[in-house]
Image (cartoon, rainbow, N blue to C red):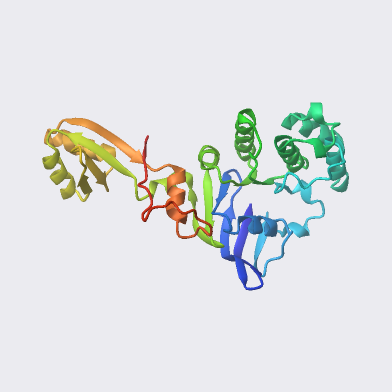
Amino acid sequence: MIEARALTKRYGATTAVDDLSFTVPAGTVTGFLGPNGAGKSTTMRMILGLDAPTSGTVTVNGRPYTGYRRPLREVGALLEARAVAGGRSARNHLRWLAAGNGIPASRVEEVLRQVGLVSAARRTVGGFSLGMAQRLGIAAALLGDPPVLMFDEPVNGLDPEGVAWIRSLLKALAGQGRTVFLSSHLMSEMALTADRLVVIGRGRLIAETSVADLIAEGSGNHVRVRAASGPELAAALTERGAAVVTEADGALRVRGLGADEIGEIARVRGYGLAELAVQQMSLEQRYLELTRDAAEYTADTGADAPPSVALSTK
């Protein structure tokens, strides 16, 4: 488990992380989201003791990371895949890490097989592609068989097979009861991989909840209904407390009642339905809705108003 309490980091007059508190429990994949400049990397560095907080605390399984004598046995992390001595071979890099943390050399061969780098184990890291460097960084994170794992943009440079592999790996690690903390800008992958989310903006917490609950609270979620007796159905739904808008094609856009409730009301009143569909925001759409006021860098769309949000049917 990772626990941050009132975590703050200032660099002169700039506050990178501002009174941030959250928990990353064991047994789940927790996604860490936020715009560029939100403080994600700074937070992860403070978890690993690479930066000292200005105030507040962060612990890993109840202790500061710097308090562990053999940290790779407690926390495995990939923050920067290229932060490796380029003249070393992949195998020797992992052997060096293992020797400093009391990890058997046999474990090096195990993780090389696990990440698919056995054939490249003798090659110098300086000649690795970004995808291969990512795999080596993941191997280093797994080396000590730690109960806590942290990954910053782990799919960078991976091909589709590699992306599917890391997704399955993260889920499997959480399924073993480990704590998995994942930062990424790829919302499609986060939606497929994460169970929970911690969302920050300008160094402050915006949301800490499950993926399903975060999406369910989106302002664009609604039920689309079409019936021959549209006005009568709209009146009946409004009586039950729903917010109903009639769209240009005559369909009803309904918020405040679920599809099952709407279907039952229509059945009881004898209104035949031509369409009953749940329209739900994607994780990307919901994330953009949450963070639109927290983005430090935004592009000029050339329009006075943002484009309307397209919704996906599920």
**Looking at the image, which residue is at 48% across and 51% down?**
209
Residue 161 vs 311, above or below: the answer is: above
Left or right position of 160 against 277: right
Left or right position of 161 against 261: right
Q: Position of residue 241 (x, y in %)?
A: 21, 51
Q: Is residue 62 visible?
A: no
| Quadrant for the C terminus in the image | top left
Q: Quadrant of residue 186?
A: top right
Left or right position of 116 against 240: right
Residue 145 vs 58, above or below: the answer is: above
**Looking at the image, which residue is at 48% across and 45% down?**
211
Left or right position of 59 against 296: right
Comparing 217 with 248, the one in front is 248
Comparing 226 with 272, the one in front is 226
Q: Position of residue 216 (x, y in %)?
A: 39, 46
**Looking at the image, which residue is at 60% across and 30% down?**
160
Question: Furthest-top residue in view?
Answer: 119
Comparing 113 with 38, the one in front is 38
Q: Position of residue 191 (x, y in %)?
A: 50, 40
**Mark count:** 0
**Looking at the image, which residue is at 81% across and 39% down?**
126
Q: Is residue 162 visible?
A: yes
Question: Furthest-front residue in view?
Answer: 302
Q: Quadrant of residue 275?
A: top left
Q: Position of residue 202 (x, y in %)?
A: 54, 62
